[in-house]
Amino acid sequence: MQNKARLELADYEAENLARLQRAFARKWEFIFMQAEAQVKIDRKKDKTERKILDSQERAFWDVHRPVPGCVNTTEMDIRKCRRLKNPQKVKKSVYGVTEESQSQSPVHIPSQPIRKTTKEDIRKQITFLNAQIDRHCLKMSKVAESLIAYTEQYVEYDPLVTPAEPSNPWISDDITLWDIEMSKEPSQQRVKRWGFSFDEVLKDQVGRDQFRRFLESEFSSENLRFWLAVQDLKKQPLQDVAKRVEEIWQEFLAPGAPSAINLDSHSYEITSQNVKDGGRYTFEDAQEHIYKLMKSDSYARFLRSNAYQDLLLAKKKPESEQGRRTSLEKFTRSVGSFLRTKMQPKLFCNQHRPKEAPLCQGSTSCVDIEAQGMWTEEVLEE
């Protein structure tokens, strides 16, 4: 708006002005008129006052909207200070690739001589790269897919998303849930959840019992009993830990143990050393080895076994049969009630029956007609 050379806009200011013109294109004429009115008011002020206001405005924008590449005009750029103090410092990216830091400041800094790379630097770089290789990196798309799959798998077990079946007895009059919990047979939804992971079987008391029965059929139940014994050891009071450690060792790991488990030599050596100073985590390595063994071998066979498949399919039959039986019972009861209602007026007690009426001998459906204020003749006419 001003053509004076001292008030010409810089390149970045001109770009910002053009961006604002595009953003406020519909109101730009009104904004321009307001700016012209403000300029006319400023011209009426004293020259000294105008200079003070102009300097204050420039200082405000230099601090709060600095020139690109600078922190602000009142302090030194921290990145610039670091380069001056450490001229040989190089920047490392996230993936361990060294990159020379580039200045975003328009001020030119003379380049410093870079020292030669030594063997120690190469060794450090190799160690760093090996550590980066061992890092577990996943793409965000893979993580999102895993979360979506997990959510879809467990959505029917989340009562906040899917209504519980049967309904909660505390908020409804249906006590079917308590009846299911009291019964020894698990529900179909419960059995289906065992197939999600091995941890689901171990968390469920009924699941552990079914898995133990399967292992007994394969003569390998000592693995599960050892794992459960170690889990129970971690919950024991401190005064009973040493005694319980010795019992577990004598039952599962000692030479000639009655329920010896299959343990590799490395885990056995570590466990043997830990038993000398028994604690809650003495059998940690052995427990982890047995857990992996059951998860990779026994659990897969358990899901393919007839015991699990029969248990999973057996839950579908009673529901349909019970539904049909319930419908049949309802139909039978309704028909029986209808027939009793129709036949009830035709029954007479022996003292009031005519010759044509059949004798009612000990029938519980006899109607006392006189007590109901009905005449025998009227009933006979009907």
Image (cartoon, rainbow, N blue to C red):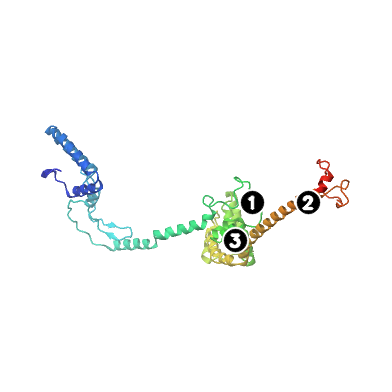
Could you tell me which residue is drawn at 30 percent across and 63 percent down? 122
Q: Can residue 271 be seen in this view?
A: no
Side (left or right) of 332 relative to 353: left
Q: What element carries label 2?
A: helix
Q: In the image shown, does 320 or 188 lie closer to the viewer?
A: 320
| Quarter of the N terminus within the rendering | top left
Disc 2 target residue: 343
Question: Disc 2 vs disc 1: which is toward the camera?
Answer: 2
> Which is in the foreground here, disc 3 or disc 1?
1
Residue flagged by tag 1: what amino acid is it?
Thr
Q: Please name the residue shown 31% across and 62% down the image.
A: 125
Q: Which of 340 and 138 is in front in this view?
A: 340
- Rounded to the nearest whole Å, what is the CA distance between mark 2 and mark 3? 66 Å
Tell me whether the residue at label 3 lies in contact with that at label 1, contact meaning CB atoms closer than 8 angstroms: no
**Residue in front for this viewpoint, 330 or 53:** 330
Question: Tag 3 or tag 2, which sits nearer the N-term?
Answer: 3
Figure check: 353 above or below 33: below
* Residue type (three-letter) at the residue carrying disc 3: Leu
For the residue carrying disc 1, how many other residues have a C-alpha within 10 Å: few (<14), some (14-19), or many (20+)?
some
Q: Where is residue 166 in the image (x, y as percent from the top left)?
A: 60, 52
Rendering coords of residue 130 (x, y %): 36, 63
Q: Distance between the residues labelled 2 and 1?
A: 37 Å
Mark drawn on residue 224: 3
Q: Alpha carbon of mark 3 to alpha carbon of mark 1: how far?
A: 32 Å
Label 3 sits on a secondary structure element that is: helix
Three-letter residue code for mark 2: Met
Residue hosting label 1? 176
